């Protein structure tokens, strides 16, 4: 049974994080409020037992990441003609050589990853994004200025150095050998840029970010946001009714928050209200397009991560997307309630799931628990994700450790 604690959480936030109760427009650091970041810093300084386990993990990750990178799309290039040195390139994970036509166009095997595909740019982008977020947390929460120095090196290589920088488009994402050199579906590959920007937000908040570098990074993201929202591939992905549409919108929201672009922000919020919730969620909370996949539980959870992330980003700007309902009364909270029993007990899921489901990869319960006042969701997240040391989970663990009465 869900225990209502919304009022209690709000009062707790106001006591612990005074800035959480000021107008949202002045307080958003994308996924965390400035007041929340300050409270975490103070908890670290006083060695608060509530945050200590997660701070220890953060320190270990930070020390490793201070030696990691830099990465560049130019360091590893695909064996494909016509792809520029600075262009990001990846190949669709579920496309395989056709045994009946060797050397011909690849064929699709949904949910089965082809081990021979080119993954170097994809892997490097993910490493870059995760590392920047860890370094931002190390600088902001732990006061380690050397994190900013390493972050600057990483940012320069990926975004700014003319010889190494990624061109601000994704014309060659998730290509299919023998069929095309890139698809709109490849845009989901740049989701790690959300985590990179979270790190930059934290570096800026710690006043450890060079203004000239900041201006150049903003120019890069402005160009990429323009491509996402105007190019044929970007518009194709915008129209996707499944998780691809969700994560396109989440990226637009994150980049527009960083750029302080109200028009793009409002477009993202409207996209959730007018398109994603109506096209994805049924009255019982199910998402049929995700359930049609061969990894149906994994895709359902991944889609809810993106929707909850959108709700959190909007919430910090004073916009409530959690209450959005479609004509069938489908909503994001209803979708979370529908999926929760299966996240807790994946063996009860009766639809197709050809790989092992990883419940620790779901973080939508943490965001929903805070917003909706559900102790059940908060405790479920803390139980399932406790061993996950990726930066978004560490950030949520630190936040929950201080904002929820134990």
Image (tube, helix red, strand yellow):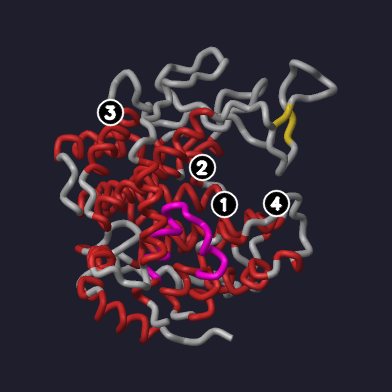
Query: Residues under labels 2 and 3: Cα distance?
Result: 22 Å
- On the image, the x and y values in percent for residue 240 come to 56, 47
Vertical relation: 39 (above or below) 168: below
| Residue at the image point whose x is 46% and y is 52% from the top | 390
Q: Earlier in the sequence, mark 1 or mark 4?
A: 1
Query: Residues under labels 1 and 3: Cα distance?
Result: 30 Å
Instruction: State left or right for residue 282 relative to residue 182.
Output: right
Query: Residues under labels 4 and 2: Cα distance?
Result: 17 Å
Query: Residues under labels 1 and 2: Cα distance?
Result: 9 Å
- On the image, the x and y values in percent for residue 7 come to 36, 86
Q: Earlier in the sequence, mark 1 or mark 2?
A: 2
| Residue at the image point whose x is 56% and y is 16% from the top | 80
Badge 4 crowding class, 10 Å Cα cut-off, few under 14, some 14 to 19, many 20 or more, is many
The extreme top residue here reads 81
On the image, which quarter does residue 283 sit in?
bottom right
Identify the mark at residue 243; answer none if there is no mark.
Answer: 1
């Amino acid at each position: 049974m869900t225990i209502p604690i919304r009022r209690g959480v709000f009062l707790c936030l106001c006591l612990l994080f005074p800035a959480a109760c000021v107008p949202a427009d002045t307080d958003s650091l994308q996924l965390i409020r400035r007041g929340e970041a300050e409270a975490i810093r103070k908890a670290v300084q006083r060695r608060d037992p509530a945050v200590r386990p997660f701070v220890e993990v953060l320190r270990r990750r930070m020390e490793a990441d201070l030696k990691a990178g830099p990465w560049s799309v130019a360091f590893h290039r695909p064996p494909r003609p016509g792809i520029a040195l600075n262009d990001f390139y990846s190949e669709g994970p579920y496309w395989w050589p056709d045994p009946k036509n060797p050397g011909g166009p690849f064929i699709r095997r949904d949910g089965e990853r082809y081990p021979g595909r080119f993954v170097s740019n994809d892997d490097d982008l993910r490493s870059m994004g995760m590392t920047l977020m860890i370094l931002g947390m190390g600088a902001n929460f732990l006061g380690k200025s050397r994190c900013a120095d390493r972050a600057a090196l990483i940012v320069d290589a990926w975004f700014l150095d003319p010889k190494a920088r990624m061109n601000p488009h994704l014309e060659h994402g998730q290509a299919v050998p023998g069929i095309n050199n890139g698809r709109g579906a490849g845009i989901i590959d740049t989701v790690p840029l959300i985590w990179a920007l979270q790190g930059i937000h934290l570096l800026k908040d710690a006043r450890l970010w060079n203004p000239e570098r900041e201006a150049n990074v903003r120019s890069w993201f402005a160009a990429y946001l323009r491509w996402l929202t105007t190019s044929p591939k970007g518009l194709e992905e915008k129209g996707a009714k499944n998780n691809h549409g969700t994560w396109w919108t989440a990226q637009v929201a994150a980049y527009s928050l960083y750029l302080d672009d109200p028009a793009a922000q409002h477009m993202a919020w409207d996209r959730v209200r007018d398109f994603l919730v109506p096209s994805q969620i049924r009255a019982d909370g199910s998402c049929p397009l995700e359930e049609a996949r061969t990894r149906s539980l994994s895709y359902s959870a991944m889609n809810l991560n993106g929707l909850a992330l959108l709700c959190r980003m909007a919430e910090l700007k004073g916009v409530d997307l959690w209450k959005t309902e479609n004509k069938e009364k489908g909503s994001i909270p209803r979708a979370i309630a529908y999926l929760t029993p299966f996240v807790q007990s994946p063996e009860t899921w009766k639809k197709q799931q050809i790989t092992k489901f990883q419940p620790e990869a779901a973080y939508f319960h943490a965001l929903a628990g805070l917003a909706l006042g559900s102790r059940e969701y908060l405790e479920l997240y803390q139980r399932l994700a406790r061993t996950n040391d990726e930066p978004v989970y560490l950030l949520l663990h630190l936040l929950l450790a201080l904002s929820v009465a134990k």
